[in-house]
Amino acid sequence: MASQVLPPSFSSDIIQDRTDGYWIIPFQLSPEDHLPGLVVSGLNSGRVQFLENPKNKISNQDGGSEETTWDVHDIYPFKEPVSVIAADVTENGSLDLIVSHQYGPNMIECDMSGGWVSWLENPGRDEWDQGGYKQWTKRDIGRWPAMHRLRAGYFTQRSILEIIAAPVVHGKEDKITPVPILRFQAPEKPRDATEWQRDVVDDQHFSVVHEIVPKKFDGPQGVDSLLVASREGISRLYFENAAWHVDILNISEPREPGQTTGYEAPGAGDNWGCGAVDAGKVGNDPFAYIASMDPFHGGKVCVYTKTDRGLDTVKWERHILDVYGTPTQNRKWGDGPGHYVVCGDFDDDGDDEFLVSLIGALDRDEDLNVKPIQGGFNPNKGIMYYKAIDLENGIFAKWRIASESSARIALGDFTGNQALDVASISYNVIDYYEEPQPKVTMHTNDIVLPPTASLADSIRATLWDGEGMVYLAQPLEIKAPASKPLIQVANYAISVEIYPSKSKVPINNGEGLKVIYGSLSETYDGNVTTRKPLGGEPFPALASTTSKVEALDADAVLGAIILRMTPTPGAELEWEDVEPETQWEKASDVPIHVTFDLKESGLEMPEYKFTRVDQLWWGKDDERFKDQEFYNMPGFHFRFLDSKIHIAHIQFWTAGTKVSAGAHNHANDYFEEIHVSLSLGTKDGGMSMVKPENEDDAKTPDEAEELPDDKWIHEAQEPLVEHGSMWHRDSSGNAIRGWNNVVSYPWHKWQGGSGDYIDVWMAIEFNPDLEL
Amino acid sequence: MASQVLPPSFSSDIIQDRTDGYWIIPFQLSPEDHLPGLVVSGLNSGRVQFLENPKNKISNQDGGSEETTWDVHDIYPFKEPVSVIAADVTENGSLDLIVSHQYGPNMIECDMSGGWVSWLENPGRDEWDQGGYKQWTKRDIGRWPAMHRLRAGYFTQRSILEIIAAPVVHGKEDKITPVPILRFQAPEKPRDATEWQRDVVDDQHFSVVHEIVPKKFDGPQGVDSLLVASREGISRLYFENAAWHVDILNISEPREPGQTTGYEAPGAGDNWGCGAVDAGKVGNDPFAYIASMDPFHGGKVCVYTKTDRGLDTVKWERHILDVYGTPTQNRKWGDGPGHYVVCGDFDDDGDDEFLVSLIGALDRDEDLNVKPIQGGFNPNKGIMYYKAIDLENGIFAKWRIASESSARIALGDFTGNQALDVASISYNVIDYYEEPQPKVTMHTNDIVLPPTASLADSIRATLWDGEGMVYLAQPLEIKAPASKPLIQVANYAISVEIYPSKSKVPINNGEGLKVIYGSLSETYDGNVTTRKPLGGEPFPALASTTSKVEALDADAVLGAIILRMTPTPGAELEWEDVEPETQWEKASDVPIHVTFDLKESGLEMPEYKFTRVDQLWWGKDDERFKDQEFYNMPGFHFRFLDSKIHIAHIQFWTAGTKVSAGAHNHANDYFEEIHVSLSLGTKDGGMSMVKPENEDDAKTPDEAEELPDDKWIHEAQEPLVEHGSMWHRDSSGNAIRGWNNVVSYPWHKWQGGSGDYIDVWMAIEFNPDLEL
């Protein structure tokens, strides 16, 4: 959380001047449209309109000039339309519209013969254009008085489109009887149907329902369920095991002593519970917090966080972040200013911020008449932007991003800038809050993202008992390569890098690349060769990790995780007074600098050094190593970030003139190892393996150590050269396993040569249970 | 999470050399003991022993020398004791011991007539000393074969002590039948009882139970419930609604294909599920993660984190952090090396780390005979320390803190250093893992805590629409004062500070202290005066915020939250080229520097400046302010961290010669305000209030503005002076409320005087609904 927060930055343009205002959604008129337009409406004008995104127009249509006007097209005239939603009713690939209308002047005086839900068939952009934007075909779905919010989705099954429709109250002058929340199921022949099949989802739990928000709370494969904002608070309404269930997550604004249930309340207002709700993602938790405005049309901005007191249940703790509104508005009469809440990731950091819509200030005198309000800016009008800073303590930061009246918000990338833009419509409903000069405003997201935003998601690091631990994303899951420096040793800077599948992996002259997961392919002189973690042909084959090409190709399916070894004299040499050289007399002369940075985690890496093997726990009782110029140094672990599965471990070694690193066969170890030489100071040092015909000539390490040179195969190993596998392999090339599933090896060792300097090499120990 | 992690630091002393080793707990022999001692035991020696903490001895007992030897006292000899726990069976205030014993040589060959649970009555330290440490009285509770783990607590009710007893297997050569977990209820007369009332808690769910850990998962007021580590994984076993319930939280190590349920498994081992478990706190979540070693006596160190996919349920995601053990030990034969897991906050940062006990390496040859193991250090032996770095991704850091064999760990402040120390006993059980030279080792926690560790818990900060937001802990909940700088303005550095109840609040000459919550009392010349947020006597009374004493006393019950105003020429003057002065010609000359730091939250505070009121939204249409030398500047919000309840808001003002800050009566505001003067450049400026007899002479602000001087009461207000309340008060001194519950005020204003410079003052607006 403590990384730099990018403050919001939006530039605003008025895109429609209106006479009223209530509803706004993003709407893609045609499946071919590159960017969404908007559908807007108001209760009093009755018009449902499409606002055409100017960036969608063909640029030469108006003589090639940059078009910025949002053309307004009437779709259909209704009596008091409330909600408009989009869904593909005809299943032809184009979105149709579904509208609740004939509401009445307000919820108390709702039209008892109205509350219709109807759908409008999208004629298609071409047809509509040619018909001079003639009206769409309207067909009815069903009705209930005071019908208010609509949502489309798959709530009880995954096959047939369903509309959930929620009246705000049960009927005229009745805020007490629980409302019937209806489910309409799309018919097979929607053009012929006179109405749609309907069920009552619930008519026992909810009164004064001001918002329903569909969410996939059981994961992307689950059915849709709903967050309901009502006088009862915030609830989850969901279908499971063939029945609808209601979980009240929090009562939100509690009913105060003195609050009556009557619809006329000259004293205490009759609103409590929740008025608007959405759920936000933080980190890995898609429902990390709930944001709300409480109560109905109320001014309290609240967030709810999980208290996690128990092992297997969640309680939601309420934090009141702000109380907007004039003293009148705080009487809970439903006078505003809060109307809408929506979550979205506006700064692209993976966490959802949330916005709240404030309609504006409203005051009443002691006769309850609305008093004229000062025009222009008012603190109770606009859009506020909240970002979680410390979710556990319910601490957010807040910015104002708009100052005009906002009834609701439509989110989308309306400008094609890959960021979430904000479109808003002013609140203007007759005899309630009437914003002068209502309008639709586009707030273009101007946030500038830092270029390295994805590294933290791809590579995570920690300290692991004195070594570095690197957790790596699956290359399949990343979009861009990521790299983390590990160490500079023997004049090579070594880093670990992840590449998505099919990406290019650049390589400079003199560099080595060692794959530890996936593969790298190299095309040279028309020949394609592929590098894999466990090497190519078995020992005594050797292979260079360098290349003559400029870039290799990461595996087309798996991508690649690699170690890059860059000579430091030509690269970043971060420590000073070390002259570039490539050979050293003793281990303590080898330049070493740990570049692995753990500051993000608040940790510090130790500096590494070579330790003589006769001082290590496993070497100190072995007479073969006594006083030998044979050294070891810690290294790094590599694991997958999601599964934590071990990929490999690296460590470093040195051996002097004629020194044997000890014949062994890993009878009690559990890995497949490959060595990459970094410096060959003994001139002809390298790996030695006992000849296959002599494998049984020694039963113990000491006996193996005594075997004469002619019973060994030896290969000198130049810097940046790796050797082929030494472990026993079956006819398919897989490692043969011995007692306790260890990987079976012949006797082998690194054998220093006759030169006067020391050999330095890196051992890579692979997990034998991982497919590599 | 990204604050600096303190690496663990422990110094080790061997405090007992033993012949075997299995069990260790902290034990306070007498309620008067300052520090706990230890109770230890081993299966083969059979001795349950008390190790006397040398720091508990009277220092002159042995001639005054610093005593460091842990004296060993035999308590009672048993045949194969397994678990020993402490509980006050006799209810006399001293802890007694409860022991499971007569186990048999191992679980497969368990003694079918054994498995006794007995209790040992603590004779009291004096009695025991005088009797030459004679044995304690043993009485039986009950039994079941293979009785293994015991826990004391209140599991089904809150009144009568209960013991939960869990056999490891059902009986001889039977690892398959679920074990009977027993509940024993303490009798009224434990000294006379021949056995205790018992129930079977569960005999359907759990096989191979290796650990039960009591936790209060329903909060501190709830009953105890248990985490169970068994072949079924990690479960919660709890009593609710008159019945025992089992929730499997995670199956932990899954059963692999080929694993049989037989107790002899020459091929695949017959252990899966979980072997040891504990739950750790992080931040506000007391059960933020579960740590385990899997399976029975296995080497996998795992943590489980909440995935939070849903709204009201928790799933636990498993992260395998490490796999210890030789290839033999990884066969899942139960050969070790993992034996115990325990969570604790060792670095006092509020988050639990966890420790794991590793008994040591064990290998078997192909005839399953145990092979001799190299002595001394072994990576599979010791205690590892894990700390959560990124809990969401399951990322921890790891350190080794001990290298000797560890069977179990006792945590406690054994050294009186206020930090959690670690005592450990080696694992040595005949015919299984026999550590040579087993011992008890004390690892003293040497961690050095930074002095300001508690600030973050007391004061949290964020950005709030261009102002600073300060969330403050309840003074009741903090242990030490905490302070956060806010702003330097008009040559005063202003900070907000919290003081626990009864603490001393220092004040320097020239400083002002303004209480905003709780109170401050001052004793001078024998008189006690008390400062409260809403001031003392009503206006026209004035009071200075300075003092002649050196320290004031924070409220004995509530503590205090204060604003401290320190003259900057003598204090930290963080900005440059500002000459100390106290008067300015215009608002833009007033030195301002926001010192409120939001770096911890990744946010940046804007710099503040004074804005002329005729450019503010509420002032721009008011003719009275046109071109007037009347300025306003943003300030800070103060709220409680836990409840988020608003305490007060501050902001800053300036007014020039003869300038009126506008008569008003807050008819549409909602606060109680007090002003503190910072500079009195107009010489006789200050608050003006219309005389009570003239209150009705004006109906509007404009009319009030026109009232002649003789209808006003005016008081010049020197720097650091506050005025008394101006709002209307009832006979109890409480604010009178008007329409919409606003606080009722007479007409009032700040009125600039005749001097040539400007006045600068701070307004504090208090929440009228908060008891202050």
Image (cartoon, coloured by chain):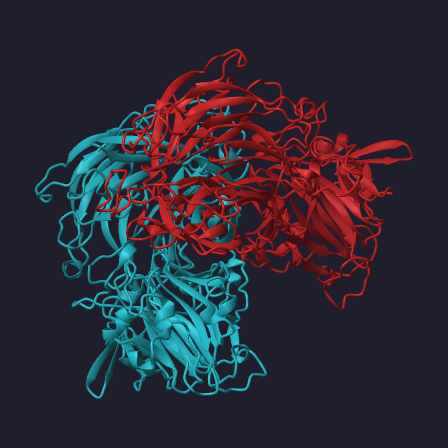
Chain colours: A cyan, B red
Give coordinates of residue A112: x percent, y percent: 26, 28
Q: Residue at x 10, y 39 (%)?
A: A193
Along the viewing direction, whichever of B689 and A185 lies nearer the viewer: A185
Give coordinates of residue A321: x percent, y percent: 52, 43
Along the viewing direction, whichever of B280 and B31 lies nearer the viewer: B31
Give the image quarter of residue B5: bottom right
Give coordinates of residue A254: x percent, y percent: 47, 29
Q: Residue at x 73, y 61 (%)?
A: B591
- Against B741, residue A630 (above or below) is below
Q: What is the residue that sits farthest to the right in this orientation?
A: B525
- Asked whether, in this view, residue B566 is left or right of residue A747, the answer is right
Along the viewing direction, whichever of A449 and A617 lies nearer the viewer: A617
The image quadrant where one finds the C terminus of chain A is: bottom left
Give coordinates of residue A679: x percent, y percent: 43, 82
Give the image quarter of residue A416: bottom left
Query: Does residue B49 appear in this view?
Result: yes
Q: Residue at x 20, y 52 (%)?
A: A95
